[in-house]
Amino acid sequence: MSLAAAVTSGVGLVNDIENGMFEKVLVSPMNRTAVFVGKTAAEVFRIAVQVAIILGLGVVLGAEIATGLVGAAGIVAIGILFSLWFVALSNALAVLTRDQESTIIGANLLQFPLLFLSSAFLPLAALPEWIQTVAMVNPVTYGVDAARALMLDRDVMTVIEVTAFDGALNSVLPGVAVLLALALGLGAVTVTLLTRATSSDVR
Amino acid sequence: MTNSERGAGEAARDGHRPAAGADGRPAVTVEDLRLTYGDGTEAVRGVDLRIPQGEFFGFLGPNGAGKTTTIKVLSTLLSPTGGTVGVNGFDVTGVPRKVRESIGYMAQETSIDPELTAEENVRFACEAYGVPRGDRQDRIAELLELVELAAVADKRAEEFSGGMKKRLDAATALVHEPPLVFLDEPTTGLDPKARNRLWEYFEAINDRGTTILLTTQYLEEADRLCDRLAVMLDGAIVAEGSPTELKRRVGGEVLDVDLEGGADARRRAATIAGDFDAFADASVEVTDEGISVTARTARQHGTDLLVALRDAGLTVTGFNVRAPTLDDVFLAITGDGLDDDADAVSSEVSP
């Protein structure tokens, strides 16, 4: 869900490129990191609201968050963290392709395999071995497991076994670490691309 | 008093303007600028340029001549393939942010956020350019007043006409009171009334001491606004000078006369026009319908020629005095008119 919302972020940037606002920003002395951070902050706020609504609906429909209010806040936080790397990815695609369709196709092409080849819909144990292998390097697995662990208050991560912490934290902490690293890495790539971004390709 | 002298004086009097106005360093220096796009198109091939502060300078040329590309290099949107470019004393590749702080840029395509109101668009620009918080309210009010959009300040920009959008766009390019402003074909696609208002507005900015670099396809526009012009063609400057100097190269205005009768009548008319005292420097051509006279005094003494033709027993069926067009200027400068095909091809590669 965070993923789907994050996909559209790059589309917004492409719109800006097409209507000239992006060029207007490029020609201003604005720090390019600020350009990315500002865009991401807007996206993050939207995603946080969406996650909160879904959690609220879940509770109304009878789901129970074992870790209580703190856990709910934690799940929202994981949702945000989870969206960050995909916002960065989709914005990087936007700067590279400068084309709305390519950005949507590129982002969707990644979105669906990432979702299905993870622990999002089925327990990994029930899936063929090759999917388990893919899921192990799939960041979606870490995000989903971390959120699920908070929901159920126990260690549900099966791709890697961490036992250094207590219960659910064995899933949450590695998940957060993976997502954070990914968000920072892709964020840096996007900022670099934005810094070098010019109006056209030049020799 | 020339325009640039007046500009410098205004700048010195105007307290909150950046200090760049006073030291006499040129606003723009370009040496041997070359730019080749990724697909191999050589858009600019060796341009040299020097624009003093306070000048209203124009780039005149057809689509694809390299005007926009040059302006994009000057505003740091493109990195030059070769050559050195200084803007307000800063190198565009070395310290692009210093350049960006010191210029205003109005793109060829209107670039405002249609979902924001006029006031919000200008406010966003204030934030992008780091206008001090305390100054913003006054600055926004002043700019909206200047472009005559104060009455619709709270309306969304998507409801505006093309001319209003352009004026709003121009206002957003000026929030940081830059000493140098780039205007890339600011009036293309506007109706004559909207165009005139923009012109008045640009003249007002220039009178305040701001150096302006404008690109245009219209000789009329360059003539009205610019102190000095560079005519660009195929990525190079083919002529440079004041509008008057350039028009002198064309040789004045053009009087087309349509005549009754055959080739013989036209030849006789051409002889009369060639010997005509008031058109000492005229060039006369025989056309399919009559004759075409290019002379500096064509407008004042055109009627005299018509009378002389009638007295010689020739029947004039129509006449028209027109200002030289961009095509005439190119014809005079290069000895070759604009090639429509080449124009179409090169406009595709122009970003």
Image (cartoon, rainbow, N blue to C red):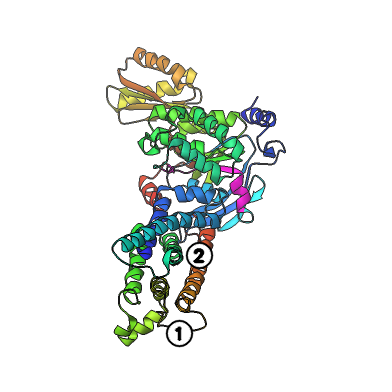
Query: Is B153 within the magenta?
Result: no
Against A191, residue A134 (above or below) is: below
Residue B53 relative to residue B341: left or right: right
Q: Which residue is mark 1?
A: A161
- Residue B56: image tag: none
Cα separation between marks 2 and 1: 28 Å
Question: Residue lying furthest right in this view?
Answer: B23
Q: The residue marked by circle 2 belongs to what chain?
A: A
The residue segment tinted magenta is: B96-113
Residue B106 is situated, as x and y percent measured from the top left of the image, at: 49, 41
Numbered label tally? 2
Which residue is nearer to you in this view: B252 or B3? B3
Residue A41 is situated, as x and y percent measured from the top left of the image, at: 48, 56
What's the amino acid at mark 1? Glu
Q: Which residue is mark 2?
A: A187
Which residue is nearer to you in this view: A53 or B80? A53
Question: Residue lying furthest bottom in this view?
Answer: A129
Which residue is nearer to you in this view: B38 or B250? B38
Residue A11 is situated, as x and y percent measured from the top left of the image, at: 38, 57
What's the amino acid at mark 2? Gly
- Mark 2 in CB contact with mark 1 (< 8 angstroms): no
Which secondary structure, mark 2?
helix
Q: Residue at x 68, y 39 (%)?
A: B20
